[in-house]
Amino acid sequence: MQLADPVEMGTSSNSGTPATAAADVSKLQPLLSLRGMSKRFGSLQALSDVSVEIATGEIHCLLGENGAGKSTLCNLIFGVYKPDDGSMQFGGQDYRPAGPAAALTQGIAMVHQHFSLVPDLSVVDNLLLGQARGILKRAECAQRVRQLSEHYGLALDPFARIRDLSVGERQRVEIVKCLMREPRLLVLDEPTAVLLPAEIEGLLTVCQRVAAQGCGVVLVTHKLAEIKKVAHRVTVLRGGRVVATSNKPANEIDLLVRAMIQRDLAGLDASASAMFGELAEEADAGSAATTEKIDDEIVQINGLTVRDAEGVARLDNFTLIVNRGEIVGIAGVEGNGQSELAAVLSGMLTASDGRFFVASKNMTNRSPQEITATGVGVVPEDRHAVACVTGMSLAENLFLNRLDDFRHWGLLDRTALRDKARALMQEFDVRAAGPDIAFSSLSGGNQQKAVLGRELTTQGLVFLLAAQPTRGLDVGAVEAVYGQIRKACERGVGVLLISSELDELISIADRIVVLYRGRIMGHCVAHASERERIGAMMAGHVE
Amino acid sequence: MTTMAINLWQQARLQTAIWISLAAVLFAILVGLVLVASMGVPLTDAISAFAEGAWGSPYAIAASVNRALALGLVGVGFVLANRANLTNVGGEGQIALGGIAATAMSLYGGASHLPGPLPFIVPMIAAALAGGAWGGIAGVLKAKVGTNEVISTLLMSFIAVWLVYWCVQSESLLRQPMHNTATLPESLEIPEVTKIPLLTGDYSMPLHWGLPIALVLAVIVAIVLDKTVFGLRLRAVGLNPVAARRAGIAIVPSILLVLFLAGALGGLAGAFMLQGDQYSLKARFSSGYGFDGLVVGLLARGSVPGVIASALLFGFLRSGGINMELAAGIPSAIVMVIQGVIIVTLAGAAFWMERKRSGK
C-alpha cells in the first residue's frame, strides 16, 4: 500500500496472500495505462493528475465516495469525455478514443450507471441495435444470450420487453451487451448498487471468469466486501486525485477506508458502515425495543394490489401494519413491487384493489396533496424524477409542497422563503452556498438531505415513507439520513423503509418484510442472524 | 427551431443571450442587405425605403407599433405557456378566432348599442374568450389524452384560418351583403363606436388604446410569472411534472389555464388588429402574425421585457419591409428571410454554447 504515491504502483513485491487475488499482479501484463489524466468541468476539477495501470486478467477496483471522480475516469477510458491532460496506452499503443464507438472497436466495453436501452424493444432487439447489419438474426442472438446467461448466471429472457424488466434485470442486459463483444477490457460503473446479494455474488463471479479469460476488469464500487472478495488491485480516489493504491487490498481494508473517507470505519454509525458491506456485530441494537412498540397503529395497509396494463399483479394483496415509532423495512430485489407500493402509498399510482389507512383515515387513491395533508412524508425512490425539480433553486425545492405558506398580498414572499430555507438547511445539515443556489448544483447527499428535510417537516407528520433513501450517497450523508429517520422515529413517527441494501435494513429497521414478485414472502425481526433467511426469501424461496 | 434548441437557448445566461441576439439580428440584416445588393437594387434606395416605412413619419411609427402590439401579445402568450413547458404555436389560429369573434360582436352582437367604452371593450373580451377557447381545446387534448400541443395548436390554426375564409365568403355568416358580383368577400366595416379609440385622436398617428392595454397585460403576466406562487408552480410543472404532482400541484388545471390564457392573448391580438387597424374582416386577415409572434416569443427567451423588445424589432422590420416592396420594388419576403436567419443563427449559437459547456 502506498498512500498518495501511485507512481510506484506495481513495483512492490506481493508479500501478503490476499484471499482471492491469486495472480501476482506485478507479473501481469499491463493492458491499459493512464498517465497524468486531468479533466475539468467548468469550475469543477473532476480529475487531476490521475495515473492508473490495469493489467490483463486483473480485476481493478476503483474505490471512492460519490463525486471522487470514479465515473469521470471511467468515461475518459470509454471515450465519452476527452481528457484535458494526460495520455492513455491500451495494449502497448497510444489510445485516444474519439468516442465510445472507437473504444468499443478497440475492445473496451462499459456498463454505465444509467442504462441505454430502448424500453419498447425486446432484449434481443436492444442487443442487435448497436451491432446488426442487414437482416436481423434474432434466433441466433437469443441463443447467444442464453449461452452467456447460463455461463455467467445472468438469468434473462431474450424476448422480454425492456419496459417489463426490473432495474436489476436491465443491468444484466447491459452486461450481456458488453460480453457479446468479447471485450479486452470491461468497465463496470457501480454495477452492484442495484443487485440482490445472490446476484452480486453472481456478478462478482462473472467478473472473475471474465478476468480469468485474460480480460481486464475495472470495477467501480464502494463496497468493501466486494473488494475483499475479487479485487486484485485497488485505486482509491478522493476529490479527483489518487490518494491510495493497494496490491493486496483484502489485507488493507482499514487503510483503504481511511484513505477514502478520511475517517476510521470503527467510528461510523452502524448502519452507515453497513453500506460498505461491513456489518457490525451489534448492529441490531436498534431493534431491541421491538416488542414494546405495539398497539399504536398509524398505518394499516389492507390487501393492496396493483395490476399493470396487462393485468399482471405488480403488488399482490399486500397487508401490513406500521406502528408509531417503528421502522418497518421492506426488503427485496428491485422490481418486486417496491416501486408500486411506494407509488400507491404516495398517491402517484392507482390501486387496483385493497385499501390503506393513515391515522384511521382511508387514503386509498387520494391525491398526493391529500395524502401529504394527512401527515405523510415521502422520500421517493427516484430523487431526480419525483422528489425535486432540479432546475429550480434549493429554497424553492425545500418548500415545493407548501408554497402557499409564502403567499403575501398575492405575491411570493421571497425573503420569508429564503429565511425559512436557511433554517431548514441548518437543521438538516444541507450544505450549499445559499438558499438560492440551483438544486442541481448540490451533491447527491445534500439533495437527499434537503428532500428528507422537506418531508420530515411536513405539517403533522405521522408517517414517513422512504424508498431507497441512501442510494448513491456518500458515507457522511448516509449517516445523516439515518440519524434523521431515527430522530423522527423517536418522535413517534411510523416509518416504512424500502431498501435493496439488506445490511442497511438489518441495522436500522425494527422488523423486515420481504417482497418477492409483489407478494410478501415473510416477516422477520431485523437481526443479523436472520440474514440468510431473508436472503433466501428475497430470491423467492418459501420457508 | 427544435424543442431541444429552444431549451438550450432558454438556459443560456442573460447577458450572453442579449449579445447573441444582437449579433444574430445584425448578421441577419447583413444577409438581407447582401440579398438586396444581389438583386441589383442600390443599397441606399433600399435602406431609405426601409427607414421611411419603418419610422420615417409619425404614421409609419404608429403602424410599426401597432404591428408590434399583435406580435407582442402572441409572444407574451407563448412565454406564459412556455413557462409550463408548453409550446403554443397556434397564435395564427387564435388571432383568426379573435378576429371572427370581434367582428361578429361588433357588427351583429349588439356591442355598438352599449354605453360608455363598452362598445369596443365587449368585442375585445369576446375575441379573448374565443382565442382562449381555441387554445383551451389544445389544453383539453393535452391533459386528457396527451396530444402534443405543438401538433394540436398548429393544426387548429389551419382550421381557424379557413374558418375566416368561410365567414367572409358566406353571406349567412359575416360577408357583407352582395349587391353585385364585384362585392368583395369581406365583412362590413365595423361601427365607429366599436373601433378602438386613438390615443391622439388624429389619424396621422394612429396609435390606439390597445398599446396601454397590451403593456398593462404584459406587466401583469411578468409579475404573475416571476413574483407569484402560481408562476413558481407553473415553472415546477414545466420542469418536472411528476415532482410537481407529488408536491401537490394540480397539473391538469395548470395546463388548461395556461393554454387558455395564451389563446386569449392571441385572440386579443386579433381584436386589436381588427378593431384598431383593419376595421373589417378579410380573407387574409392575419397573414402570419401568429407565426411571427411565436418567433417573437422564442427570441424573448421566456422574459416579458424580451418579448416587448423583440416585438418592436419585428414590428418595425415588417413595416420597413412592406415599404421596401412598395417604394424600391424589393420583395418584402426579404424580411421573412431576415427573420429566418435570426432563428437559425440563434439555434446554432445555442447548440454551440451547449457543446462548449458540456466539454465534448
Image (cartoon, coloured by chain):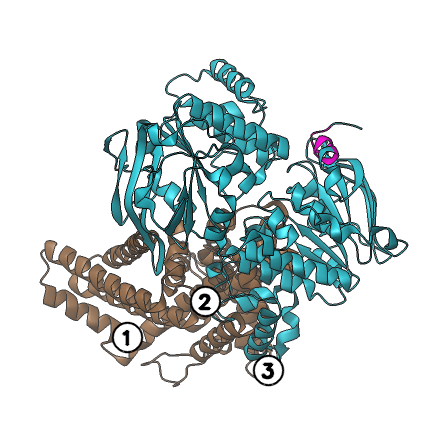
Chain colours: A cyan, B brown
Residue B60 disc label: 1
Instruction: Please tell me whether mark 1 sits on a helix, a strand or a loop.
Output: helix
- Relative image position of residue A71 (x, y in whole percent): 42, 45
- The chain that hosts pointer 3 is B
In the displayed structure, would residue B347 be above or below residue A542? below
Between B217 and B350, the one nearer to me in the picture:
B350
Give SS at disc 2: helix
Question: What residue does disc 3 label?
Answer: B115
Residue A377: x and y in percent read: 70, 59
Q: Are marks 3 and 2 in contact (CB under 8 Å)?
A: no
Q: Are marks 3 and 1 on the same chain?
A: yes
Magenta stretch, main secondary structure, is: helix
Q: Position of residue A92 (x, y in %)?
A: 24, 30
Q: Which residues are magenta?
A: A533-540
Identify which amino acid the numbered label 3 is placed on: Pro
Q: Residues within 10 Å of mark 2 (few under 14, many from 20)?
A: many
Q: Position of residue A315 (x, y in %)?
A: 74, 37
What residue lies at 52% left-to-right and 31% top-to-bottom? Answer: A19
- Viewer-closest of B253 and A25: A25
| Residue found farthest to the front | A15
Spatial distance from mark 3 to mark 2, Cα to Cα? 31 Å
